[in-house]
Image: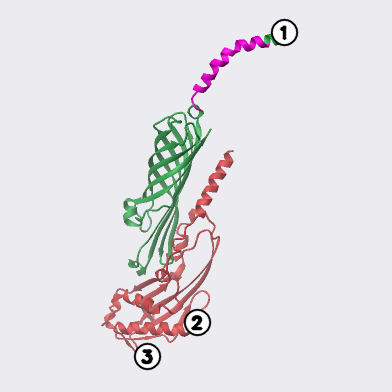
Chain colours: A green, B red
């Protein structure tokens, strides 16, 4: 009997406290604002050659341009991540005669380059982690597994190498719903890869304009 | 957990590497053909008047050597003779002391390459050794996903020998011009005119009339 009384008393005393706690619970910032978390982003879009790379080797844009990144989003307006990409440029030139040390070569050239960058990425954000629209700028540096393949007809002059790559980007993340974990990503990135081989003497410069989807978790 | 992430990243790299494109899938037979010519720049071809040609097509390569004289070979030789006549040279029999002689050969080689991919460290691996030193730096392009590659190549090889000015000291005739016709569809006889005309036309210095 005594126990029931104490329990009841306890209930009555704690009722106001419960009532006060509930609004506080709802007022708490989202976990994405309170904790560091992760974002995975898949991007795809156009790759546009620029600079000496465009004038000297390939100037045809490509849609074979993808990347995947995972970022660790800190409570500061910064994230640190890794991005793996793949871009493939290809351009066919009509038959022409090329002069070389070996003589005259009459051929249809197919100029290709395959880029596979692995970059460390630092991003700075202009809005809170849980903002519906979160613009950002990025700096990236890493290594590029690149394959230069220049085909004369069906004959290949091919070189594979690992080169330094770096870039800068600006973009924004758009949440599909408030507090949600899925959203869209739009980004424009400038990327430069050092290379000095055959037709390319001042590296591979390109602009990647991509749209993507991201998923975040904590 | 950490290992899973690293494995995931590796798997992704593998997928990206495996997705090699074949940029030559839409290349026509004509567009696949490459005509390579080279000549001795110290030679003035205007000094030559007559030529002769081998009576059958030579076969050179690491699978054995010999000669062949099938219907397409005769057709090819006749096409070469016609092109030489068009450039102003007069055909004579080998016994009549031609100024230049033409060799016509089919080069047939086979190689087995062991390739492990992905491996970015091969550098210029593909470029070496093909073509018996005639044109180093070029080989056949294959999808890089193969781990064993058997390469067979066969192509036409033409060369012009200077009989008028033999190298007496070394007892040899100098090769003053050569040409390679490489690519696909080389031996079906359909394009011989175009093929042979291409190598002579891009060698404008051969013209003597």
Q: Which residue is mark 1?
A: A2
Left or right of B148 on screen, residue B34: left
User: Chain letter of disc 2?
Assistant: B
Q: Which residues are magenta?
A: A7-30
Q: Nearer the viewer, residue B167 or B10?
A: B10
Q: Which mark is residue B66?
A: 2
Tell me the distance, in whole angstroms, between the alpha carbons under discs 3 and 1.
132 Å
Q: Position of residue A4 (x, y in %)?
A: 70, 11
Left or right of A174 on screen, residue B50: left
User: Chain letter of disc 1?
Assistant: A
Element carrying mark 2? strand
Element carrying mark 3? loop
Mark 1 or mark 2, whichever is nearer to me: 1
Q: Which residue is mark 3?
A: B93
Residue A18 vs B101, above or below: the answer is above
Q: Position of residue B51 (x, y in %)?
A: 34, 86
Q: Nearer the viewer, residue A140 or A135?
A: A135
Q: Position of residue B71 (x, y in %)?
A: 46, 85
Q: Nearer the viewer, residue B46 or A155?
A: A155
Residue drawn at x 48%, y 84% as measured from the top left: B70
**In which quarter of the view is residue B200 placed?**
bottom left
Residue drawn at x 54%, y 57% as measured from the top left: B116
Tell me the distance, in whole angstroms, between the alpha carbons under discs 1 and 2.
115 Å
Is the stretch drawn in magenta largely helix, strand or loop? helix
| Residue count near mark 3 (Cα–Cα under 10 Å), binned few <14, some 14–19, many ≥20 | few
């Amino acid at each position: 009997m005594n126990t029931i009384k104490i329990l009841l008393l306890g209930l009555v005393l704690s009722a106001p406290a419960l009532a006060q706690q509930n609004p506080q619970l709802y007022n708490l910032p989202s976990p994405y604002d309170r904790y560091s978390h992760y974002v995975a982003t898949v991007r795809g879009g156009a790759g546009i050659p620029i600079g000496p790379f465009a004038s000297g080797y390939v100037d045809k844009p490509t849609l074979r341009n993808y990347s995947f990144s995972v970022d660790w989003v800190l409570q500061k307006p910064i994230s640190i991540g890794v991005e793996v990409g793949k871009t493939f440029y290809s351009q066919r030139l009509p038959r022409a005669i090329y002069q070389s040390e070996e003589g005259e070569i009459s051929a249809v050239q197919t100029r290709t380059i395959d880029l596979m960058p692995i970059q460390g990425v630092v991003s700075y954000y202009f809005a809170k982690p849980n903002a519906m629209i979160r613009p950002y700028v990025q700096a990236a540096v890493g290594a590029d597994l690149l394959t230069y393949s220049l085909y004369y007809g069906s004959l290949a002059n091919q070189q594979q190498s690992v080169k330094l790559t770096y870039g800068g980007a600006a973009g924004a993340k758009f949440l599909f719903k408030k507090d949600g974990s899925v959203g869209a990503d739009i980004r424009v990135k400038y990327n430069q890869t050092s290379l000095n081989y055959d037709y390319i003497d001042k590296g591979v410069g390109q602009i990647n304009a991509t749209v993507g989807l991201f998923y975040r978790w904590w | 957990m950490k290992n899973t992430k690293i494995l995931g990243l590796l798997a992704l790299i593998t997928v990206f590497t495996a997705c090699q494109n074949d940029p030559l899938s839409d290349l026509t037979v004509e567009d696949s053909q490459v005509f390579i010519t080279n000549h001795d720049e110290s030679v003035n071809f205007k000094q030559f008047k007559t030529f002769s040609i081998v009576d059958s097509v030579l076969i050179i390569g690491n699978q054995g050597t010999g000669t062949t004289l099938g219907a397409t070979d005769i057709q090819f030789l006749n096409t070469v003779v016609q092109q030489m006549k068009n450039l102003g040279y007069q055909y004579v029999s080998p016994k009549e002391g031609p100024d230049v002689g033409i060799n016509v050969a089919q080069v047939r080689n086979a190689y087995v390459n062991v390739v492990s991919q992905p491996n970015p460290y091969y550098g210029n691996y593909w470029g070496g050794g093909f073509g018996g030193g005639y044109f180093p730096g070029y080989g056949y392009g294959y999808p890089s996903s193969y781990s064993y590659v058997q390469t067979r190549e066969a192509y036409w090889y033409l060369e012009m020998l200077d009989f008028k000015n033999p190298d007496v000291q070394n007892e040899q005739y100098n090769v003053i011009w050569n040409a390679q016709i490489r690519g696909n569809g080389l031996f079906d006889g359909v394009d011989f005119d175009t093929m042979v005309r291409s190598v002579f036309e891009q060698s404008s210095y051969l013209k003597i009339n």
